[in-house]
């Protein structure tokens, strides 16, 4: 990965630790080799931190990353919740808006040609989605309903040989919420995906059939 792009990703605001980001980059390159000419899709871009690793890998592989987020924040980002960041609130609208920061992050990293923002609610977009994906990264709503819905709607679009990446997978409940771990287990139990790599809370699975 180019050193300046990695430095931008490490410095970007958000929740992706560098070692897990590097694993995303490697997964992107591998996915593009396994499934040429198909896009990547990320659910949950926030301020664009993970988008730099995945978008960089897309650019290096001559494909693109669809970065899907309604940019209104998850439940845990809302006022009064654990991860609320008041400076991200659009005061006139009275809601979180991470789209301006996301755009700035992608622009400054020189990735506007490779990262396409899909601004909307994941199930609303997923309902009409048809394109096979080389790589799907799930890091959107972490509640039971959103996580399982993302699993059900989006994983069928991972092309054979493509990769499914899931963030915030914590086998020990003491480390974090259950839904990402549950959908990781669902993917394995489905028989359609096999474990490929684990780095921190990131899991990389490959579509077998
Ligand atoms: N990948 C990011 C962190 C994502 S945080 C990083 O590297 O920093 C989770 C994101 O999921 C939030 O930005 C939130 O707005 C988005 N999200 C939650 N539920 C969503 C939904 N139903 N549709 C679209 N985006 C959603
Ligand atoms: Mg995450």
Image (cartoon, helix red, strand yellow):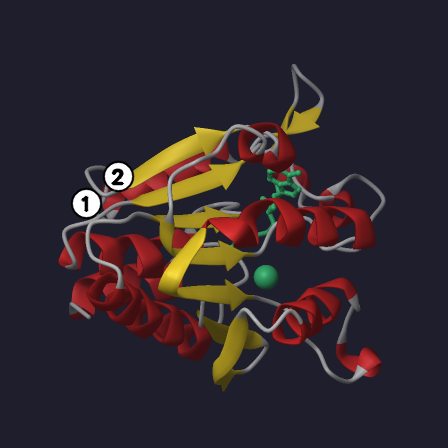
Do labels 1 and 2 touch, CB within 8 Å?
yes
**Number of residues whose C-alpha sits closer than 10 Å to that of mark 1, classed few (under 14), some (14–19) or many (20 or more):** some
Image coordinates for residue 25, horizontal then vertical, percent: 31, 68
**From what the image shows, is residue 190 above or below residue 83?**
below
Image coordinates for residue 76, horizontal then vertical, percent: 76, 49
**From what the image shows, is residue 79 above or below residue 173?**
above
SS at mark 1?
Answer: loop
On the rendered structure, is 14 left or right of 50?
A: right
User: Which residue, as the protein is rendered here, is positioned at the far front?
Assistant: 209
Separation (CA) of disc 1 from disc 2: 5 Å
* Residue 122 appears in view: yes
- Front-lying residue, 86 or 8: 8
The residue where tag 1 is placed is: 110
The residue where tag 2 is placed is: 107
Image coordinates for residue 31, horizontal then vertical, percent: 30, 65
- Front-lying residue, 170 or 148: 148
On the rendered structure, is 86 left or right of 55?
A: right
Q: Residue at x 26, y 45 (%)?
A: 64
On the rendered structure, is 130 left or right of 60?
A: right
The N terminus, quarter of image: bottom left
């Amino acid at each position: 990965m180019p050193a300046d792009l990695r430095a931008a990703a490490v410095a970007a605001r958000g929740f992706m630790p560098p070692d897990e980001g590097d694993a995303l980059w490697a997964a992107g390159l591998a996915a593009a080799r396994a499934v040429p000419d198909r896009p990547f899709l990320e659910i949950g871009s926030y301020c664009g931190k993970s988008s730099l690793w995945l978008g960089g890998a897309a650019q290096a592989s001559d494909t693109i990353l669809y970065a899907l987020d309604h940019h209104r924040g998850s439940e845990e980002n809302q006022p009064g919740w654990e991860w609320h960041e008041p400076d991200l609130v659009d005061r006139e609208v009275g809601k979180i808006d991470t789209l301006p920061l996301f755009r700035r992050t992608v622009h400054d990293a020189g990735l506007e040609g490779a990262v396409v923002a899909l601004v909307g609610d994941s199930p609303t977009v997923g309902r009409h989605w048809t394109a096979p994906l080389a790589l799907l990264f799930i890091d959107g709503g972490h509640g039971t309903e959103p996580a399982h819905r993302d699993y059900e709607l989006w994983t069928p679009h991972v092309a054979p040989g493509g990769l499914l990446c899931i963030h915030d997978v914590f086998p020990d409940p003491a480390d974090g919420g259950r839904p990402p771990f549950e959908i990781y287990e669902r993917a394995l139990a489905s028989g359609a995906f096999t474990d490929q790599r684990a780095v921190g809370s990131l899991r990389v699975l490959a579509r077998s059939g």
